[in-house]
């Protein structure tokens, strides 16, 4: 289970980074260039989107890195990453996989009671 949490956390963190790049870039673009009618408008909570863009992928990758040695801390970090992605971006077509991977990785890390057999 710990290995599965590690893999899911890394993949979820990388996808979260991609979503985060676009989320942070979008808010910055609208801030500097202005809104474009109904096509591109600023989000309601810019700081939440930017914080989620930065912190959630870091939490996912850090949780994945700790999954084999410190499973409880890893599970908490992975679940926090999933919650941050959901709070910052909502559940949509581009966020469903990083949220699901980080969430499942967190649950698996918390459920791992003994080291994986080799």
Image: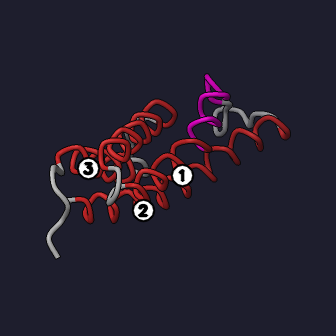
Q: Main secondary structure of the magenta part?
A: helix
Q: How is the image coloured?
A: secondary structure
Q: Secondary structure at mark 2?
A: helix
Residue 40: x, y in percent? 66, 38
* Residue in the foreground of this view, choosing between 61 and 37: 61
* Residue in the foreground of this view, choosing between 58 and 88: 58
Q: Nearer the viewer, mark 1 or mark 2?
A: 2
Task: Quote the CA–CA distance across marks 2 and 3.
Answer: 13 Å
Residue 72: x, y in percent? 30, 42
Residue ID for mark 2: 10
Q: Are marks 1 and 3 in contact (CB under 8 Å)?
A: no
- State which quarter of the image contains the C terminus: bottom left
Residue 51 sits inside the magenta stretch: yes
Per the rendered image, the range of residues in magenta is: 43-53
Determine the residue positioned at 47% across, 35% down: 84
Left or right of 110 in this view: 48: right
Residue ID for mark 3: 109
Which is more N-terminal, label 3 or label 1? 1
Determine the residue positioned at 65% across, 37% down: 50
Residue ID for mark 1: 19
Which residue appears farthest toward the top when viewing the image?
Answer: 44
Residue 73 sits inside the magenta stretch: no
- State which quarter of the image contains the N terminus: bottom left
Which is more N-terminal, label 3 or label 2? 2
Q: Nearer the viewer, mark 1 or mark 3?
A: 3
Which is more N-terminal, label 2 or label 1? 2
Determine the residue positioned at 40% across, 55% down: 66
């Amino acid at each position: 289970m710990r290995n599965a949490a590690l893999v899911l956390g890394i993949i979820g963190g990388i996808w979260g980074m991609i979503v985060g790049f676009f989320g942070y870039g979008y808010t910055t673009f609208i801030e500097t260039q202005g809104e474009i009618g109904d096509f591109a408008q600023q989000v309601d909570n810019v700081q939440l989107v930017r914080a989620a863009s930065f912190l959630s992928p870091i939490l996912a990758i850090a949780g994945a890195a700790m999954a084999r040695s410190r499973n409880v801390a890893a599970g908490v970090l992975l679940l926090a990453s999933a919650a941050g992605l959901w709070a910052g971006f909502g559940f949509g077509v581009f966020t469903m996989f990083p949220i699901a991977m980080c969430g499942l990785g967190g649950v698996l890390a918390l459920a791992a009671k003994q080291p994986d057999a080799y």
